[in-house]
Image (cartoon, rainbow, N blue to C red):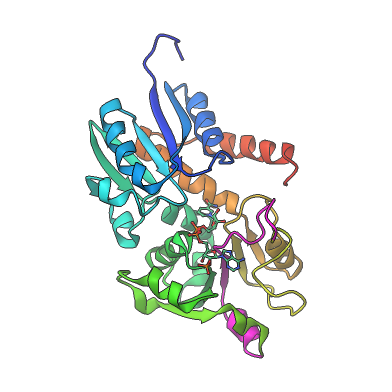
Amino acid sequence: MSKRQAINVFGLIGRNVDYSWSPLIHNTAFQALGLPCVYTIFNIAAPELVGDALNGSRALGISGFNVTIPYKKTVVPFLDELSAEAEAIGAVNTIVNDHGRLKGHNTDIAGFAAPLVPLAERIHGKPVCIFGNGGAALAAVEAFRLHFRPSSVRLMVRNPKKAEAMLEGYAHRELVEPRLTSELDGPSGKTLLGECCVIVNATPIGTAGRDDAIRSVVPPGRNLLHEGQIVYDMVYHPLETPLLAEARAAGATTISGIEMLIGQAARSFFIWTGQQMPVETVRNTVLAEIEKSGAA
Ligand code: NAP
């Protein structure tokens, strides 16, 4: 990239997100393809500032954003247009600035679906289970509905009121069956999970550095996982969480959150640049960094 060339600026909108791997992912891809682009982090301290930030980006000509916790819904009223996916779940993780017109997309849905595509036949017509009732859980619900047609989605939550709030305004509410995580401690726990062909963790439990880093969403010592299941943890740090370690020991197929992380990033990259992300180069770079940080 020439030092005299104008640079297209992209960035991540979030709060306290200096830990993010997104700059590494996108800058590796820009460099590999020789694109005059750079990706940085925009920590926004409070929701009241999000509108100013987006309006400023129109004036400055910032090319695009990713959006993460806690602003995926906050950005919506400040955008000019939404993709069908973003509209379906009322959340945006990617914005493209087309000459001052901001369009919001949601690539978490396709990014979540990507590693499940080769396993699609195992999912069709069967129940699946998702732990969590945040934005990532809703993206997974929509991904299952759009791409895999399960018979139902069991949403494992601590608080049914929060599950109802998450599903408010979601057009396909009938697919989702909220269940309490406490049920897993009782006699029905084994069938509740055992009948599901996919089990997804869409909570931060198991993330390195947290108090619950050594925990799993599945209660220990009860053999609730089994061979033939697909266990998918959205947590990507560490690569093998306690949930995935237990699933591997039970003979289940495991999917690390790194696949979703790269999957959603590749789709954002395509929306911004019209080019395919060099996924293998990016994956190797991220894996090397994770190994260096001691969290593999
Ligand atoms: P969020 O909106 O903050 O939701 C977090 C969910 O986790 C809530 O349902 C919350 O339940 C539940 N939870 C938190 N702590 C819990 C605990 N100790 N026990 C039981 N449940 C707990 O976050 P999000 O955006 O949905 O993201 C969820 C996770 O997915 C995060 O770890 C995020 O990093 C990860 N993620 C990964 C990718 C990827 O590309 N791999 C993409 C998106 C998200 P309550 O409502 O009851 O508190």
Position in image of residue 205 (x %, y %): 63, 62
Position above or below: 83 against 202: above
Q: Nearer the viewer, residue 64 or 75?
A: 75
- Please name whichever residue, 204 or 245, is drawn nearer the observer in this view of the structure: 204
Of 5 and 207, nearer the camera is 207
Q: Residue 215 sits in which quadrant?
A: bottom right
Relative height, residue 96 to residue 73 (above, below): above
Displayed quadrant of residue 169? bottom left
Q: Which residue sits at x=56%, y=70%?
A: 198
Judge whether residue 220 can be spotted in this image: yes
155 shown above or below 11: below
Q: In this rendered view, identify the residue nearer to me: 116 or 28.
A: 28
Answer yes or no: is residue 151 visible: no
Magenta residues span 187-211
Count up the numbered dots: 0
Q: Measuring 45% from the left and 52% from the top, which residue is drawn there?
A: 70
Does residue 42 appear to the left or right of 213 in the view shown?
A: left
* Left or right relative to 176: residue 21: right
| Ligand 1 visible in quadrant | bottom right
Q: Residue at x 37, y 64 (%)?
A: 146
User: Residue 240's x, y, as percent?
Assistant: 70, 55
Q: Residue furthest top?
A: 4
**Magenta-colored stretch includes residue 183:** no
- Prevailing secondary structure class for the magenta stretch in the rendered image: loop
Q: Establish if 285 lies above or below 60.
A: below
Q: Position of residue 35 (x, y in %)?
A: 43, 23
At a point 53% along the width and 45% down the height, the residue shown is 262
In the rendering, at what x and y percent does residue 76 appear?
Answer: 30, 51
Q: Residue furthest bottom?
A: 187
